[in-house]
Amino acid sequence: MAINLYFVGTAGSGKTTLTKAFKDWMDRQGYNAVTINLDPGADDLPYMVDIDVRDWVYLPEVMSEHGLGPNGAQIVSADMVAMNAGELREVMDGYECDYFLIDTPGQMELFTFRESSREMLHTLGKRSLIAFLFDPIISKQPSGLVSLMTLAATTQFRFDVPYYPVLSKADVLTDDERKKVKKWAEDFWRLDTSLRERATTEIQVSIELIKSLQNMGLQKGLTPVSSQEMFGIEEIYTAVQDAFFGGEDLSAD
């Protein structure tokens, strides 16, 4: 049975480019992956879309038919996508593949915080893992990293499926910046120390959030990934295999 690998993250975090990179990597390895676009408002996509939600729900049409602006139409479209989850599942059942690579909407709240999305994920299959993308520019500030950790934890609680945190677009950071962010993610004491170097209300809130994340056992580290330089892709694949197959590799054709 195929695995559903969802790419989730804030706007501009690199979900679409990572979907393409992962698909390209799997093709080169001889694995069979099918791409799914769940964003009804997506413009040109850099990869060949195998299953496209725009065949059911298309944002410009929703705006026109309901007299809505972009924001209102996106909310309505998100619920309409979920309503078509059964038909989407039927199309998925027509494919024989190892992975479904699922590119989620640019604004993550349209996917993460809609109750309809949780039902959709279950309809598409509970054999799923979420790759949560940490934006590199936000992550290189300690308070920014904490805010993304909180979003990642919320996403995990909302969907109750395994998740794997990645530092996306890691090539835009220097080696020192990547190492610093990785150490913060692996060692909350080090992150706490960096936060305390600035005594502001924002920092105090971040420190309390760190304590909560640590108490809940959500210290998972971060894997740097680059869709441009193609590093970190195999680590995502390995994490999925570990989660569902005890690390056993797929049999390439």
Image (cartoon, grey):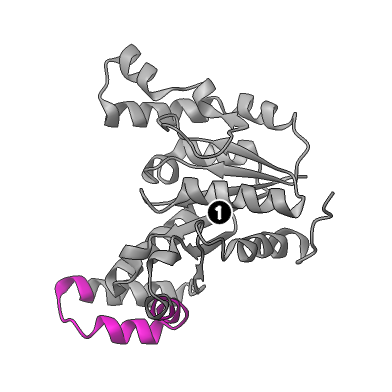
Depth order, front residue of 123/43: 43
The residue tagged 1 is 130
The residue nearer to you, when weighing 176 against 188, is 176
Q: Is residue 186 above or below residue 37?
A: below
Q: Which residues are magenta?
A: 179-203
Amino acid type at mark 1: Ile
User: Going 64% across and 63% down the picture, which residue do you hit?
Assistant: 234
Q: Is residue 181 magenta?
A: yes
In the image, taking residue 120 as reference, residue 174 lies left or right, namely: left
Residue 9 image point, x, y percent: 43, 52
- Provide residue 20's location: percent of width, then percent of height: 56, 46
List x then y, in percent, for residue 157. Answer: 49, 56
Count up the numbered dots: 1
Q: Position of residue 218 (x, y in %)?
A: 48, 71
Indicate the secondary structure of the residue bearing disc 1.
Answer: strand
222 on left or right of 96 = left
Q: Farthest top residue?
A: 65
In the figure, is residue 95 to the left or right of 211? Answer: right
Quadrant for residue 2, please give it: top right
Out of 1 and 173, give the one closest to the viewer: 173
Taking the image as shown, residue 201 lies to the left or right of residue 56, namely left
